[in-house]
Amino acid sequence: MAEIKPKVTLIGKELAKNGLEFIYEGSIAECSACKLKSACNNLKKGRRYRIVGVRSVEHTCTVHLNGAQSVEVVESPIPALLPADMSIKNTKIQFECSCNRELCPNYPFCRPDGIIEREKYIVVNVIGGAPEQCEKGRTLQFVELIPV
């Protein structure tokens, strides 16, 4: 696989720590007049990111406590449960989940934060079986996905 090139963005100074993972939720109204809004809002909404570098550049910010700081981020692998027949390392899949059993202990991994329904992902790691039996009787595998 090709090496993942980090993307530079801005994040609250108090959050700017190597290894921090977050899901980008999109821009907010308070940012509309800011001259740096395009630097803060250059990520894909709903995706999971991990900070891999903290730069020394800081900016004043009316939204973030103590301002904003430049960081380098990469899209972070997302732990998920997939049907066993789709759980093949280095396979490209289109993520879809028809389960609506929110009380099932597997549900957070069947519909993990950071996954965008019907987008394409690559299975980068197959970890093993589901922590709990699927309530629908499906055979599930615990995997890590990255967006294509």
Image (tube, grey):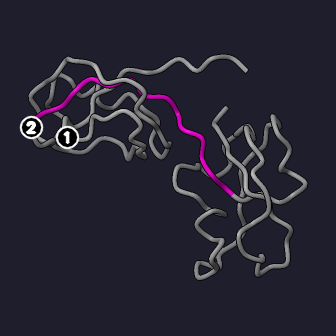
Image quadrant occupied by the C terminus: top right
Q: Which mark is residue 14?
A: 1
Where is residue 13 shown, x and y percent of the image?
19, 35
Image quadrant occupied by the N terminus: top right
Amino acid type shown at disc 1: Glu
Decide which of tag 1 and tag 2 comes sooner along the chain: 1
The residue wearing badge 2 is: 66
Q: Quadrant of residue 65?
A: top left
Reply above or below: 93 against 111: above
Where is residue 46 shown, x and y percent of the image?
48, 46
Magenta stretch bounds: 66-80
* Left or right: 116 as drawn, with respect to 34: right
Amino acid type shown at disc 2: Asn
At a point 38% along the width and 47% down the height, the residue shown is: 25
The overriding secondary structure of the stretch rendered in magenta is: strand
Q: Is residue 76 magenta?
A: yes
